[in-house]
Image (cartoon, helix red, strand yellow):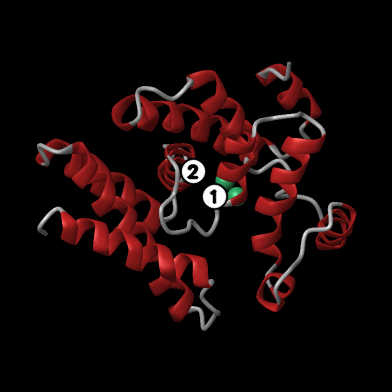
Amino acid sequence: MTDANAILSAMTISERRLKHTLGVAEAAKEIAKTHFPALDLKQVELAALMHDFTKEYPYERQLELCAKYSIELTDEERNNPKLLHAKTAAMIASERFSLSTEICNAIYWHTTGKPAMSPFEIVIYLADYIEEFREDASCVKLREFYKKALSKELDKSVALNKTLVKSFDTTIKHLISEEQTICKDTFEARNYYIDQLRAFNF
Ligand SMILES: [Fe+2]
Ligand SMILES: [Fe+2]
């Protein structure tokens, strides 16, 4: 069975990304404990350790892996190398490390998010955004927003939903400011979680 050491010793990532990866593992376990206590924290850790496994692979290697694993790419993905690592890391998690479908899906969706994410998917998506070593202003702001929301809301799922909406808003605004295309999954995720909040009467 794959354990954390097997993944860590197979990893070829920079010190900086390793620090981020370990930060995601810690944040993911905290988010799981707070919102989804039934999740297996060992599995959460494996998903976190794998999520950026291929992030530093060159674009050509990403494309080779997509071909090898028959990953179909949209034009948008082909033109945005940043989107490919989530898919190739998910395939390696499945093929090389035999991690569960739930874990692989969480890795697959960690960059864009999507509507109706599973607990595993939410935990990895959000941990990637707010882990403590991320220093960009948008991540720092979202981390503070989440902490404040948790301390203010009686219902933790409202705090979580508000944070998810805020994360998608932040990403979409950033992409617009950079004159980049917006992935439809991110757009649909934002709409889905806004609707979820309305269901809570906000
Ligand atoms: Fe990533
Ligand atoms: Fe990441």
Q: Are marks 2 and 1 in contact (CB under 8 Å)?
A: yes
Question: What amino acid type is highlighted by mark number 2?
Answer: Glu
Residue 75 image position (x, y, % from top left): 71, 78
Q: Crowdedness of circle 2 by 10 Å Cα count: few (<14), some, many (20+)?
A: many
Residue 77 figure quarter: bottom right
Instruction: Please name the residue that numbered disc 2 is placed on.
Output: 121
Badge number at residue 110: 1
Apparent side of residue 63 relative to residue 25 in the rendered image (left or right)? right
Q: Crowdedness of circle 1 by 10 Å Cα count: few (<14), some, many (20+)?
A: many
Task: Give the Cα separation between the discs numbered 2 and 1.
Answer: 7 Å
**The residue at label 1 has a CB less than 8 Å from ligand 1:** yes
In front of the other: 121 or 19: 121
Apparent side of residue 69 relative to residue 73 in the rendered image (left or right)? right
Secondary element under disc 2, as helix, strand or loop, is helix
Question: What amino acid type is highlighted by mark number 1?
Answer: His
Residue 158 image position (x, y, % from top left): 19, 46
Residue 161 seen in the figure: yes
Q: Where the N terminus falls, by quadrant?
A: top right
Secondary element under disc 1, as helix, strand or loop, is loop
In front of the other: 78 or 70: 70
Residue drawn 34% across and 63% down? 192
Apparent side of residue 124 relative to residue 144 in the rendered image (left or right)? right
Residue 171 seen in the figure: no
Residue 53 image position (x, y, % from top left): 71, 40
